[in-house]
Image (cartoon, rainbow, N blue to C red):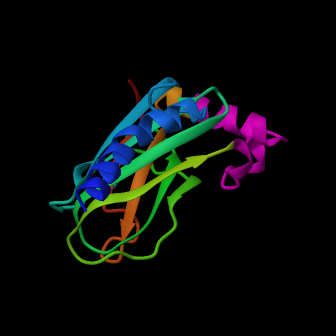
Amino acid sequence: MRFKSWFGLAAAALAPGAAACAGEIDPVASASERFEAALSGGNEVPAVTTGATGTARFWVVEDTFLVYRLDVAALDSPTVAHIHEGAAGVNGGVIVTLYPGPTRGRGYTGPLRFGQSKPSQLTGLPAGYGADTRARFDSLLGLMRAGNAYVNVHTRKNPGGEVRAQVQRQ
């Protein structure tokens, strides 16, 4: 029995090294750019009174795809989350869906979504952003770099958005 326990511990300890040898990419470590948004109800237009907060983090990897993580705290029934086009204080159209559902429970705290968007997955970008998916991806990055993109998390109580923040380059 002791052999099985030690073997399991050794295998678990060596697994990360084996994955690194297998050629997997760590998106956070290999990111060429980083962006972040600190979400609150006060950033909504108009402002929303809520105790909910959140953080959205984005990593551009090899100028090929966008890895993101969206975490929230004390958010009642989140339904969907997006990146929108727009400057601070200005509402704009949806560019990319970050969290498509399902609706989470009341007072949800934790990761809402961890994922990646490749240029071909940016279907939310309007046609005016470029004829091909690469141009659309570059347009999204341009908006993020210029501070003209924001993250908005929608809830059942506040379908227009409960927490929001501008995406800022780090």
Residue extending furthest toward the right: 131
Relative to residue 153, is residue 116 drawn left or right? right
Identify the residue at image location x=67%, y=44%.
Answer: 118
What span is colored magenta in the figure? 119-142
Is 33 colored magenta in this rendering? no
In this rendering, the answer to whether 77 lies above or below 43 is: below
Asked if one can make out residue 38 in the rendered structure from this viewpoint, the answer is yes
Q: Is residue 73 above or below residue 9?
A: below
How far across and how far down the image is residue 88, in percent? 39, 39
Q: Quadrant of residue 136?
A: top right
Which of 152 and 31 lies nearest the eye of the viewer? Answer: 31
The percent coordinates of residue 122 (x first, y second) are 67, 50
- Pick the quarter of the image with the C terminus: top left
Viewer-proximal residue among 7 and 91: 7
Q: Residue furthest left?
A: 51
Across and down, in percent, residue 151 comes to 42, 48
Asked if the stretch drawn in magenta spans residue 129, the answer is yes
Whether residue 121 is situated above or below residue 77 in the rendered picture: above
Residue 119 vs residue 158: left or right?
A: right
The residue sitting at 71% across, 42% down in the picture is: 119
Q: Main secondary structure of the magenta part?
A: helix
Q: Is residue 26 visible?
A: no
In what quadrant of the picture does the N terminus appear? bottom left
The relative height of residue 98 versus residue 148 in the rendered view (above or below) is below
The residue that appears at 67% across and 32% down in the rendered structure is: 64
